[in-house]
Image: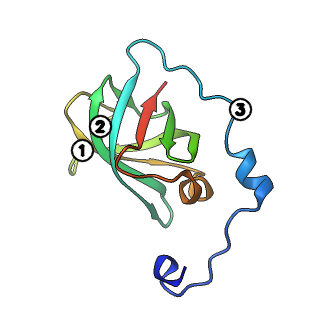
Amino acid sequence: MGWFTQGNDVKGPTPAEAESLWDAEAPEAGLGSATLKLMDAFQVPGSGTVFTGQVVSGTFRVGQQVIITGRAGFARGTIGEISVGQERPESAGVDKYISFNVANLSLRVEILGLDENATVTGL
């Protein structure tokens, strides 16, 4: 997988680490929960994993618990900071294109199988 790692030696999660990243079942999103159509996800040194996309419904807030859903399952996280352009609001609602960081997801993002159908749901 040199094309993916750009020639760097990357150590992936052990099977036990990968299994511990998911619950047995996805949690239920409540009525009025926020949904983001994911456009991109990437690692930023010192900031954790950053997700970008358009808010489809609801409102995302700093400190909010989120579920990131991909082809291979889902993972939980907490929003650390939201960016809308150059602004750093405490929340962002429908039709906004936002980016936000979620800490402690580096292993999870590698094995979630994020693609064009991936979503982020705020609980």
Instruction: Name the residue type under label 2.
Output: Pro
Q: Is residue 55 left or right of residue 66?
A: left
Q: The disc labelled 1 sits on which kind of residue?
A: Val
Residue 104: x %, y % from top left? 60, 51
Q: Earlier in the sequence, mark 3 or mark 2?
A: 3
Nearer-N-terminus badge (2/1): 1
Left or right of residue 115: residue 2: right
| Label 3 crowd bin: few (<14), some (14–19), many (20+), radius 10 Å | few
Q: Which mark is residue 24?
A: 3
Residue under circle 1?
Answer: 84
Numbered disc 2: secondary structure: loop
State yes or no: discs 3 and 2 in contact (Cβ < 8 Å).
no
Residues at badges 3 and 1 in contact (C-beta under 8 Å)? no
- 11, above or below 87, in the image: below
Alpha carbons under labels 2 and 1: distance apart: 7 Å
- Identify the secondary structure beneath mark 1: loop
Indicate which disc residue 113 carries. none
Residue nearest the viewer, comparing 58 with 70: 70
Residue at 77% over, 57% down: 15
Q: CA distance from mark 3 to mark 2?
A: 34 Å
Seen in the image, is 30 located left or right of residue 10?
Answer: left
| Residue 89 numbered mark, or none | 2
Q: Residue at x 24, y 44 (%)?
A: 84
Q: Is residue 81 left or right of residue 83?
A: right
For the residues carrying marks 3 and 2, which lies nearer the camera in this image? 3
Camera-side residue of 96 and 19: 19
Q: Give the distance between the C-alpha atoms of the residues marked 3 and 1, in whole angstroms.
A: 34 Å
Quarter occupied by the N terminus: bottom right
Mark 2 in CB contact with mark 1 (< 8 angstroms): yes
Q: Position of residue 13 (x, y in %)?
A: 70, 62
Q: Amino acid at mark 3?
A: Ala
- Coloring basis for residues: rainbow
